[in-house]
Image: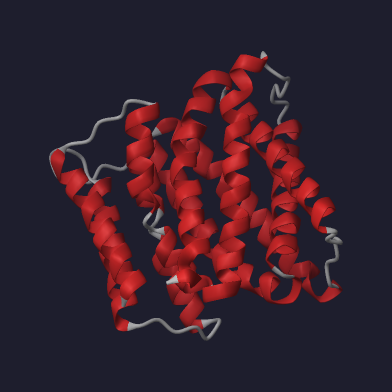
Amino acid sequence: MFEFIYALGSLFSFGCNSSIIKKSITDIGRHKSITYMYLTLITLLVLGAMLLNIKIELPLELVPDYIAEIVIGALGVIAAFKAIEYGKVSITSPVSKLYVLLVVAGGILLLGETLSTGQVMGSVIIVVAAILLSVNDKMQFKLEKWMIYLFISILCRAYYYTFIKTFVVVMGAYQTTMMLEIGVAVCVIGFHLLRGRDLSIESPNKMGFAIVSGIMCFFGTVLYSLSVGAIGAALTAAISAGSPIINTISARILVGEKLPLYKYIAIVLIAIGLIAILLF
């Protein structure tokens, strides 16, 4: 059971962070939110590396994989922020977990990982629940703007979280997190600067949620990489799919979002799926 601690810690961090990001977007806008979240994250990662005396080294043979990982990761982050801005946090977060099945499939087919029958069933239950969360109150599926961005984010996350193990195996968890997140941050911030976005610092009282978001992202990403090294990419992704439980609670508290009964039932299904993954 202790081998799941890293994954559960990452689940909690990311589960809370979507609602915090939504609050930050409301206060200072999407472009500034993503910029200062990443600046906070990078600062913490560099300070951690200095305290742990970790050197930044990227093997030459991993450079092509690294470039692909950070570019696709940055595209996924930009799309995810757009989805959060245009959609409800308590819906976008659960539906985004559809990437889990792609990571599970990639971990099994491409990385040679294995899952138990119970863990596969738990993953399927979680994804079915996520689909249930995506339909409207009339039980109809309607394509909306946030869904397009979310679909792009799902594909990018599937690639990013499948092949993160390539770097963890060679470089270790912390160095992998630092190198990848710094690369993604440079791509994201550079993209906004090239598009002429206003990234000036707001008043301190408006920057709080962006900074807290960066702190939560720091813990979430480090713990995720540690989990990949401990239990593999597929199982880590499967456990992370339980984050909508935390996300829905935080969305209700922080942004006041309410859901109809059947969506809360879907969240219970996600909890059941997570239990199946942990116990079987």
Q: Residue at x 39, y 68 (%)?
A: 101
Left of 215 or right of it: where is 274?
left
Q: Residue at x 50, y 83 (%)?
A: 113
Q: Position of residue 158 (x, y in %)?
A: 50, 63
Q: Quadrant of residue 264?
A: top left
Residue 266 visible in rendering:
yes
Q: Position of residue 209 (x, y in %)?
A: 56, 28
Q: Residue at x 49, y 72 (%)?
A: 3
Say above or below: 52 vs 102. Answer: above
Q: How many marks?
A: 0
Q: Position of residue 229 (x, y in %)?
A: 60, 73
Say above or below: 55 vs 166. Answer: above
User: In the rendered image, which quarter contains the C terminus?
Assistant: bottom left
Say above or below: 128 vs 194. Answer: below
Say above or below: 2 vs 206. Answer: below
User: In the rendered image, which quarter contains the N terminus?
Assistant: bottom left
Q: Nearer the viewer, residue 190 or 40?
A: 40
Left of 39 or right of it: where is 210?
left
Q: Nearer the viewer, residue 65 or 145?
A: 65
